[in-house]
Image (cartoon, rainbow, N blue to C red):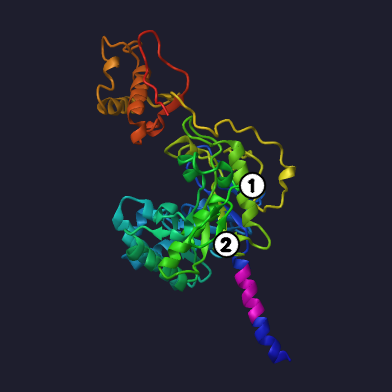
Amino acid sequence: MELGFLPLLIICLSFSISSAELAPKVGVNYGQLGNNLPPPSQSVKLIQSLKAKRVKLYDANPKILTALRNTDLQVSIMVPNELINNISSNQTLADHWVHTNVVPFYPETLIRYLLVGNEILSQPDKQIWYNLVPAMRKIKAALKTHRITKVKVGTPLAMDVLESSFPPSNGTFRSDVSGLVLKPLLKFINKTKSFFFVDVYTYFPWSSDPTNIDLGYALFESKNITVTDPVSGLTYHNLFDQMVDALIFAMKRLGYPDTRIWIAETGWPSGGDYDQIGANIRNAATYNRNVVKKFNAKPPVGTPARPGVVFPSFVFALFNENTKTGPSTERNFGLLYPNGSHVYPIDLSGKTPVSEYPPLPAAKNNKPYKGPIWCMVAKGANRSAVASALSYACSQGNKTCDPIQPGGKCFKPDTLSWHASYAFSAYWAQFRKAGGSCYFGGLATQTIKDPSYGSCKFPGAKL
């Protein structure tokens, strides 16, 4: 009787360990690209107030790892992109990195995941692509050398790793990385029982094609929109599942049908520029509350291709980060403002009913703004940087800055700010459709108020 019970006990124990590892504990991404963020000790308390169970860092910041000591938060740290090429061919460097960034904090800080780089296959430098998996192997060996066995090694990739994603059953990895990078990566993940970490944002495909993709379908709010895959026969009720399953089918194509997936980032921006459709608090709160509800579902719901499977996750992001580059949406993915107040209330445990949240503000930009929009020098912009940006803008295009030359219709007032604003607007009007932006390294801002006066007509970007 006792001997017969022992194997059953071992089976149950192994199942409970596996289930604990894959428990639907939603985490949050803790980015630090802001000059007004609270100190780590306060940030950790804010993470706990959101009822997050895990936190992902984009480095191995010692002050943050110290603040996370003796908490119940599982932690993911990251080897920076710029070290990958060197680590890939240097075991001593990998050993040193682990010795410096993991050993002093482990196990009091619950470091459980060590990610090598961030969205490496989206980088233009192809050399780093081929060094990614060798670097991961070196980091894994370094952990073993230091007798650290509970830390999984992975790398987060963006959805642009797919060259085909629709229908999901046609999911296929890019040919330039499929055989040389992804097959070895999947082999490493399976051998080490790790995860395929992936960043999944429904906002980007929807905002690039809002006519053909229903907003409700992207927000988990669709009541009557479904997409049926003609090959697999699977039916989809939201864009998130559709995107994840395209990845699952792509892995299956390479001979890895069961590789576990971790949602390394997902979220929705609560604000953006005038030309960024759907970036508002209502949509952000709706998406994140719904995706958290999905992640925390008991029993797990999975996706049509993997029903009932848990997808561990990190929501992006903890704070709005004001020094991130690019369009305004990049600085508005936070669940919290830097002062610690909520952009909108959210409970990452998924236990707070939606009915208990206060009403959300109406969405006012779910339809494209027709324009025109002008691009002006931002308040407080550095003068020498503005002068350089003015020179750059005037060097682009055809007669971009002729009207602000002496005697031109927009020469007066003869100020740096005025001339640069004209140049920024003229540049953006010419190059927006080719990918030009109204950013200029953070020196510019959009306006829908026409700055033209008299015979001076500012070019505006038409959407």
Q: Using the image, determine if residue 25 lies above or below residue 463.
A: below
Q: Using the image, determine if residue 268 lies above or below residue 194.
A: above
Which of the 4 quarters of the picture holds residue 398? Answer: top left
Check if residue 218 falls in the magenta segment.
no
Image side of residue 243 versus residue 423, left or right: right
Task: Report crowding for label 1: few under 14, some 14 to 19, many 20 or more residues within 10 A (C-alpha).
Answer: few
Please state the horizontal and vertical placement of residue 402, each as a whole percent of the image: 26, 17
Q: Using the image, determine if residue 340 lies above or below residue 352.
A: above
Q: Which residues are magenta?
A: 11-19
Check if residue 12 falls in the magenta segment.
yes
Give whichever of 274, 93 is nearer the camera: 274
Image side of residue 170 versus residue 66, left or right: left
Please state the horizontal and vertical placement of residue 132, each as a whole percent of the image: 36, 61
Residue 129 visible in the current orientation: yes
State the quadrant of the N terminus.
Answer: bottom right
Residue sticking out furthest to the top: 454
Residue bearing the label numbered 1: 223
Check disc 2 and report its element: helix, strand or loop: loop
Give the residue drawn at x 64%, y 39%: 344
Q: Which mark is on residue 110?
A: 2
State the quadrant of the C terminus.
Answer: top left
Check disc 1 and report its element: helix, strand or loop: loop
Q: Using the image, determine if residue 94 lies above or below residue 162.
A: below
**Residue type at tag 1:** Lys
Give whichever of 105, 450 is nearer the camera: 450
CA gap, disc 2 and disc 1? 41 Å
**Residue type at tag 2:** Leu
Q: Earlier in the sequence, mark 2 or mark 1?
A: 2
Give the residue drawn at x 65%, y 33%: 361
